[in-house]
Image: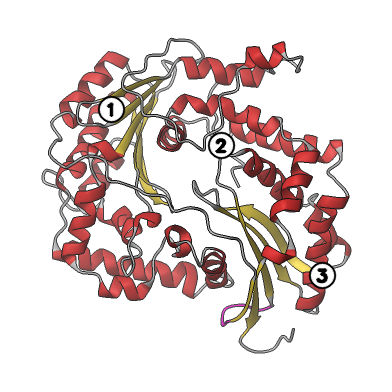
């Protein structure tokens, strides 16, 4: 669930907008919401936070280099730091059968050195200048980012360009990082309670939809069978300028930044056009039930999962609000019912995965020691049914929207986080400035919208259930 979507310091809201060779927005993206048009229709005027978002959007510039690299500039003259993010249009949904985990593997491989950067030197060069860096992988994208003092923008751009052009994909680096990923899998999933069951929930919900059927971390048997030439092919295909978005946010001078981008990224050519990315039609939602044994669990756990529409669609916004009503904090309905009132659960949550294709809505309840799976399942059913029969009150809806608004505006105030978020909006919606429309999407969700979406998508006939049992002890 996108609780924190985008935020910024509100003192940088001036500027103009230039767009060169802008990529088209995906067909599924909702039409822009024009504040003036909304006001003309009799709606309440936009609040100051919304107006601030719109003014910030006007300060953003977008360019596309001749090699296809999309560039987004978000200057903030008052910021002492500069954030740089490179988002590649590749995630686990691009992996072929038997080759799962490659996108996540490259999150690690990209820090192993390139033609002019020794292994580990990317970290040391950034750290020596007081900066920070990292990378993340999802089903839909992989990104790499760093934050540095504003005077060090050239270093960040040079480092990113060098590994985009000449990553060191040696047998030694491959074997080393394959071992690192397998150890990460053991620590985060195999040896952590309830995590493998969470992966299994996704496999069952997307069983007939290959792009999202495999977990992003990959299957260990696929990594064991991976060949070095497959890894090199994956890099050549997906790590190209035309398949990437570069964002610079924070304290920098625009003309100087564009000159540096042209100097370091402009010569990167000859790696092919953006790879085709066919998106299969959404599968039919189905019901399924499976019980798994978890050696790490102390008490049973219950997962529900449903197939829902893609992110950035009206019904998805409504379902994100539904997830907040069910699972956002101690005042949420699931906590009040299962934890506080009936003591059936130790912990509850509701979530969406926020995939750009068909998505997953999930509910999890970790049972208390004396609770039974059957009674917890019935109580979860009742609470979801109540979203249909007892719509959210004005107070509940206002609280959820205020949480979204606060997260949106204040959750990502740094140059680094702004760069990361703008890269995702540019990649997924075709224009980074569309972040300014997101708050409208959430604020316009009504209790009737939530009820309708829950009625349509969260029914028992399309529900996947994963029951988690400890290896010894508890009974259902």
Taking depth in this image into account, of 128 and 373 the one nearest to the observer is: 373
What is the number of the mark on residue 205? none
Q: If you read the primary sequence from the N terminus, does the residue marked by circle 2 or circle 1 appear first? A: 2
State the extent of the magenta-drawn residues as a range: 293-299
What residue is shown with label 1?
153
Q: Is residue 61 visible?
A: yes
SS at mark 1?
helix
* Mark whose residue sits in front, 2 or 1: 2
Q: Is residue 260 left or right of residue 32?
A: left
Kindly indicate the quadrant of the structure image that contains residue 172. bottom left
Picture residue at 57% right of the left edge, 64% below the top: 205
What residue is shown with label 2?
5
Q: Quadrant of the C terminus?
A: bottom right
* Mark whose residue sits in front, 3 or 1: 3
Mark 2 residue crowding within 10 angstroms, few (<14) / some (14–19) / many (20+): many
Q: Main secondary structure of the magenta part?
A: loop
Q: Position of residue 112 (x, y in %)?
A: 22, 54
Residue 376 is covered by the magenta coloring:
no
Q: Is residue 121 left or right of residue 308?
A: left
What residue is shown with label 3?
378
SS at mark 2?
loop
């Amino acid at each position: 669930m996108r609780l924190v979507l985008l935020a910024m310091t509100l003192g940088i809201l001036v500027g103009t907008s230039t767009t060169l060779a802008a990529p088209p927005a995906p067909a599924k993206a909702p039409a822009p919401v024009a504040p003036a048009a909304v006001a003309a229709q009799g709606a309440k005027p936009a609040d100051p936070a919304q107006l601030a978002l719109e003014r910030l959007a006007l300060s953003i510039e977008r360019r596309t280099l001749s090699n296809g690299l999309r560039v987004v500039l978000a200057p903030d003259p008052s910021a002492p730091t500069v954030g740089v993010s490179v988002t590649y249009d590749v995630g686990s949904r691009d992996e072929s059968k038997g080759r799962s985990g490659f996108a996540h593997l490259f999150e690690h491989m990209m820090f192993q050195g390139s033609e002019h950067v020794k292994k580990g030197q990317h970290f040391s060069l950034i750290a020596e200048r007081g900066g920070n860096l990292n990378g993340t992988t999802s089903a839909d994208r992989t990104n790499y980012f760093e934050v540095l003092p504003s005077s060090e923008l050239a270093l960040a751009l040079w480092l990113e360009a060098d590994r985009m052009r000449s990553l060191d994909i040696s047998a030694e680096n491959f074997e080393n990082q394959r071992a690192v990923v397998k150890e990460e899998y053991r620590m985060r999933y195999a040896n952590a309670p309830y995590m493998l069951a969470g992966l299994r929930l996704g496999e069952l919900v997307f069983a007939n939809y290959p792009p999202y059927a495999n977990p992003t971390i990959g299957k260990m048997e696929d990594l064991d069978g991976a060949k070095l030439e497959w890894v090199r092919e994956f890099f050549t295909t997906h790590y190209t300028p035309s398949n990437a978005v570069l964002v610079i946010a924070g304290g920098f001078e625009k003309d100087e930044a564009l000159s540096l981008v042209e100097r370091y990224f402009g010569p990167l050519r000859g790696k092919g056009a953006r790879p085709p990315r066919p998106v299969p039609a959404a599968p039919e939602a189905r019901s399924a039930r499976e019980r798994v044994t978890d050696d790490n669990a102390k008490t049973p756990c219950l997962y529900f999962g449903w197939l829902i529409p893609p992110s950035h669609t009206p019904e998805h916004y409504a379902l994100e609000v539904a997830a907040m009503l069910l699972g956002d904090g101690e005042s949420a309905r699931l906590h009040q019912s299962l934890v506080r009132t009936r003591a059936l659960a130790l912990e509850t949550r509701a979530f969406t995965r926020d995939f750009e294709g068909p998505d997953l809505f999930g509910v999890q309840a970790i049972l208390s020691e004396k609770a039974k799976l059957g009674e917890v399942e019935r109580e979860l059913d009742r609470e979801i049914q109540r979203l249909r029969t007892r719509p959210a009150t004005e107070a509940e809806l206002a609280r959820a929207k205020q949480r979204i608004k606060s997260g949106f505006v204040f959750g990502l105030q740094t140059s680094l986080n702004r760069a990361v978020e703008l890269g995702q909006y540019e990649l997924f919606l075709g224009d980074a400035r569309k972040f300014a429309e997101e708050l409208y999407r959430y604020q316009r969700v009504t209790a009737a919208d939530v009820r309708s979406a829950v009625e349509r998508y969260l029914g028992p006939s399309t529900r996947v259930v994963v029951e988690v049992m400890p290896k010894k002890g508890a009974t259902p």
